[in-house]
Image (cartoon, rainbow, N blue to C red):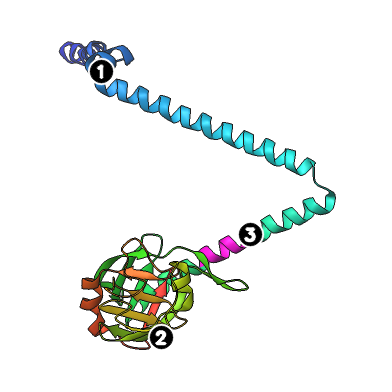
Amino acid sequence: MRTGSRHLRSIPAGGEGAHAARPRHGWREFRAEHPLLFFALVAGTVAALAIDGFLLYKRHRYVEEAARMRSGMSLVERRATDAIMARNESRGQRLRLELELLRRQALTDERLHITLALDSAVMRLERDGVVLREMPVQLGPERRVGVPPDTVRMAAPRGTRTVERVLDADSVWQVPDWVYADRGLTPPADRALRGALGPAAVVLAGGTVLYSMPSVGPLNDSAYVIPGGVRVRAEDLRAVAPNIRPGMAVYLY
């Protein structure tokens, strides 16, 4: 019994000694052992605080400027401004929702189709969520074209379109008058030009063109992309053209 009691008393004594001998590391020891990591943590913290401070400052200036502008408005002007801002915010939310639904629709389309992601400038040939070919593209700028008062604003298309025509190097395309005007050129009497959209092209319903670099006509300029259009590498369009048919769906988002 005595031996047992001595043994029981020795357990807590040994345990306390083990805990007492365990080293404790503080910030000084951590800094001494890992100086580079410590410096990176400090620098990252300082940078994050600086960015937060800058954003708070900009927000404060924005609020002050908005309040100053509103103070100079009449009650009718303030109400009209609030209505416009609310309407624009609602439109933005509705557009984001429509584009997200369009992406999901394209992912579940079991037919062969084309998707064009405008934010990443990438076109894909897909079927049932499987990407068969991915192609980088160049998007034409948004611009008001034509001669006043007959002008129209050309913008990157969004929504669902269908393929209307598939062209090759021998196909004829009627170059619009406004293209020549936009290039600072005088349109010829006959604007029907063979190969004007390059060795391969796709014309969508509504007139949007997915084209390649031509060797003739006003689009024969590597620095110029037709407003509202999409330029694709010739090798990419030639590779997918045999699979594209009139009526095929094209999702642009």
Q: Which of 251 and 129 is in front in this view?
A: 251
Based on the picture, tell me whether residue 92 belongs to the magenta stretch.
yes
Q: Residue at x 45, y 79 (%)?
A: 176
Query: What range is drawn magenta here?
Result: 90-97
Element at badge 3?
helix
The mark lying in front, picked from 3 and 1, is: 3
* Upstream in sequence: badge 3 or badge 1: 1
Q: Position of residue 64 (x, y in %)?
A: 68, 35
Q: Where is residue 238 in the image (x, y as percent from the top left)?
A: 22, 77
Three-letter code for the amino acid on which mark 2 is drawn: Asp
Based on the picture, tell me whether residue 164 belongs to the magenta stretch.
no
Residue 115 position by quadrant: bottom left
Q: Vertically, is 15 above or below 62?
A: above
The residue to which callout 3 is attached is 88
Q: Position of residue 230 (x, y in %)?
A: 37, 70
Q: Vertically, is 46 above or below 85?
A: above
Q: Position of residue 103 (x, y in %)?
A: 41, 69
Residue 191 position by quadrant: bottom left
Disc 3 residue crowd, few under 14, some 14–19, many 20+, Cα 10 Å = few
Q: Can residue 63 be seen in this view?
A: yes
Q: Residue at x 43, y 67 (%)?
A: 183
Residue 87 is left or right of residue 126, and the answer is right
Q: Residue at x 51, y 64 (%)?
A: 143
The residue to which callout 1 is attached is 35
* Upstream in sequence: badge 1 or badge 2: 1
| C-alpha gap between disc 1 and disc 2 | 75 Å
Element at badge 2?
loop
Check residue 190 in the rendering and tell me which mark sits there, or answer none: 2
